[in-house]
Amino acid sequence: NGAQLTLYDATVEADGEYTSALYLEMGGQAELHGGEVSGNGNYLLIALQNQSKLTLDSVDVTATAGTYSGYIPNAQSIYVQQGSHLIIENGSNLQLGANQISVIEGSTLDMSDSTVTTASAATDSPTIFAGASTVNITDSTVTSNGIGIVVKGSTANITGSATSNITADNDAIQVTGQNNALKVHGATVNSSAAAALHVVSGATMTNNDAIIIDGNSTFTAPTALQLDSDVAVNASDSTFDGNIVAGKTASTLDFNGSTIKNGSVTASGIRLR
């Protein structure tokens, strides 16, 4: 209860049923500086709950697919829940295979100068899922053959003062659910086969605030923006390479100093200025 642990250049491994490499609860806190974390269990690779806090500083994290009877999909995911806080920083490299980082129930993910990569058989599986939580990504790379980041009833800030790169085969950023907030500053957002930013039908923004895109951000995809819900987008000094599709909504798009290329604007009821 509230215990604290600090490790330097340690190797943490978990293998077998009902095992986790790191499991923090009841306000527990841990810091890993350097070293490695790996797992081949079926009870989450890393789990934080009950207002716990974990810092991964220059740590290599590897999740495997599981090789024994009883393995289930996403068994080696990272779950941050119940007001907990995960910090990933300073060149940490997370290779999660068919797993994900799930941040839910009022929790926070702060990721800076780091990399997370997933390769799931399910193309609708996200690399990072934020549910009623906050995700801050700064100068980091998220790579997925599914969805890059799902923002569901959450706040997401993606900042690339040096570089942030969100790359996915499906939607790179997908906004769904109620009461969201999204700001993208100086980031590169790419989708190879879907939308760079997709606001799903029925999604809303907190207080009807606009999605903010600025700082020379670049959105590149067959569909750079897909807006299936009535939202406002304020995009300044950024580039959209691909189609802009607003569906049957009354979205407001403000492209102040931004560029749209290699695509068209298709909408019903859109307000473009």
Image (cartoon, grey):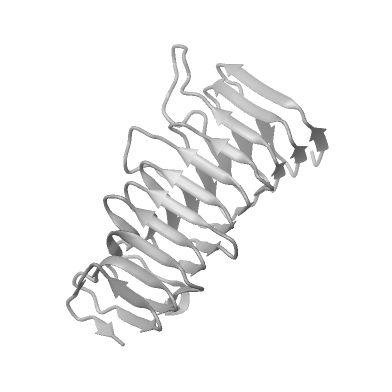
Q: Residue at x 55, y 57 (%)?
A: 133
Q: Quadrant of residue 240?
A: bottom left
Q: x, y percentage for residue 58?
A: 70, 41
Q: Residue furthest top?
A: 69
Residue at 36% across / 41% down in the picture? 145
Q: Quadrant of the N terminus?
A: top right
Q: Position of residue 183 (x, y in %)?
A: 50, 69
- The quarter of the displayed image where residue 238 is located: bottom left
Vertical order, 234 against 188 (above or below): below
Q: Position of residue 198 (x, y in %)?
A: 33, 61
Q: Is residue 166 left or right of residue 62?
A: left
Foreground: 16 or 95?
Answer: 95
Along the line of sight, the residue nearer the viewer: 109 or 224: 224
Seen from the viewer's position, the closer of residues 18 and 235 is 235
For the residue pair 260 and 78, the one nearer the viewer reads as 260
Which residue is the extreme one toward the bottom? Answer: 273
Is residue 21 visible to us here? Answer: no
Q: Is residue 60 above or below residue 112?
A: above
Q: Is residue 143 left or right of residue 163?
A: left
Q: Is residue 33 left or right of residue 225?
A: right
